[in-house]
Image (tube, rainbow, N blue to C red):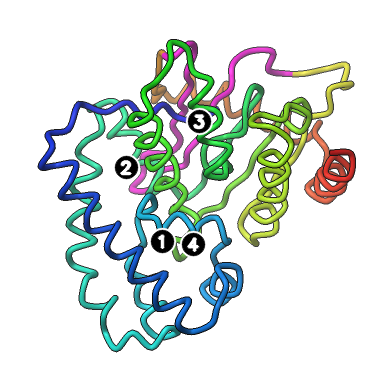
Amino acid sequence: MGVTEERRPETPAEANGSAAVFVVLGKQLRLLRERAGLSQREFGNLVNFGPDQISAMERGVRTPRPEFLQRADEILQADGLFREVIPQVEEAMTKARTRHPEWYRSYAVMEAEALELHFYANQAMPGLLQTEDYARAVFRQRRPFLSEETIEKRVADRLSRQQVFDRWPPPAVSYVLEEVLLERPIGGTDIFNGQLRNLLRVGGMRNVEIQVMPTRREEHPNLDSAFNLLAVPKGHGQVAYMEAQGFPQLITDPDDVRKIADRYGIMRAVALSPMETRSLIRQKLEEL
């Protein structure tokens, strides 16, 4: 499940102003990377990002975090070019967050600051795990149809949420994915191949554990909808988020959240281990 990124309509000035910063920055990043003779993968390895993430930043659809800009400035010998724009980038990020409606704004802030993030998915890859191409394929299949402009905005929003992986110290992140998600080639074989490889990449992070729930398990504690569980700072404990047919629900009642957390704990115990999951993903890749 991916959180729905519904937004109020932007004025042309808002849309153009916030987007222009990232588009120009992306062009400068690509120019200096190519001048340094680095591929997107090679540069990504130096800054601890995947090639998809580097590609998204170079095209202006993913917001580069200040820490990334600092590191890129050093590696690409940009002589302060990227460091100088950090204040403008931070301002643009703040404005972008306010474009979300009130209900999503609350969730987005909690997700960005969470100490722990746990996800159960049964229909499509969770938004934080999606590659750009997979996310675009998901939005293209929405009914009623979305305009191309709306699709691209939602893809950009989804990629921007993935910056939670860039935080330091990093949050503890876990996933329980139904096995069917490794068999449903949304977007076609090539896109799905990249998506499965992204699971291996993200699952290789020290703070991330991905587990698959085998379809042939006879017992399952949650024959219901997908959900997210967040452990938020400042003494707020855990909150849960779920969505059915486009209707979001943020759950904060401690007793209700405890019940969902209990189901999640049982699922993690019943699912394949992270190591077994990686083996299964590799097997699915071979079968494509």
Mark-to-mark CA distance, 4 and 3: 22 Å
**Mark 3 lies on residue:** 2
Identify the residue at image location x=58%, y=43%. 129
Q: Which mark is residue 212?
A: none
Identify the residue at image location x=88%, y=16%. 218
Rendered image quadrant of residue 51: bottom right
- Residue 282, horizontal then vertical, whole percent: 84, 48
Residue 99 versus residue 109: which sits nearer the camera?
Answer: 99
Pointers 2 and 1 in contact (CB under 8 A)? Answer: no
Q: Which mark is residue 109?
A: 2
Q: Which mark is residue 54?
A: 4
> If you read the primary sequence from the N terminus, does the residue marked by circle 2 or circle 1 appear first?
1
- Residue 7, horizontal then vertical, whole percent: 26, 28
Pointers 3 and 2 in contact (CB under 8 A)? Answer: no
Find numbered disc 1 in the image and state the secondary structure of the residue it sits on: helix
The crowd level at tag 4 (other Cα within 10 Å; few <14, some 14-19, many 20+) is many
Q: Which quadrant: the C terminus?
A: top right
Find numbered disc 2 in the image and state the secondary structure of the residue it sits on: helix
Magenta stretch, residue numbers: 221-246
Q: Amino acid at mark 4?
A: Ile
Q: Nearer the viewer, mark 2 or mark 1?
A: 1
Find numbered disc 3 in the image and state the secondary structure of the residue it sits on: loop
Q: Nearer the viewer, mark 4 or mark 3?
A: 4
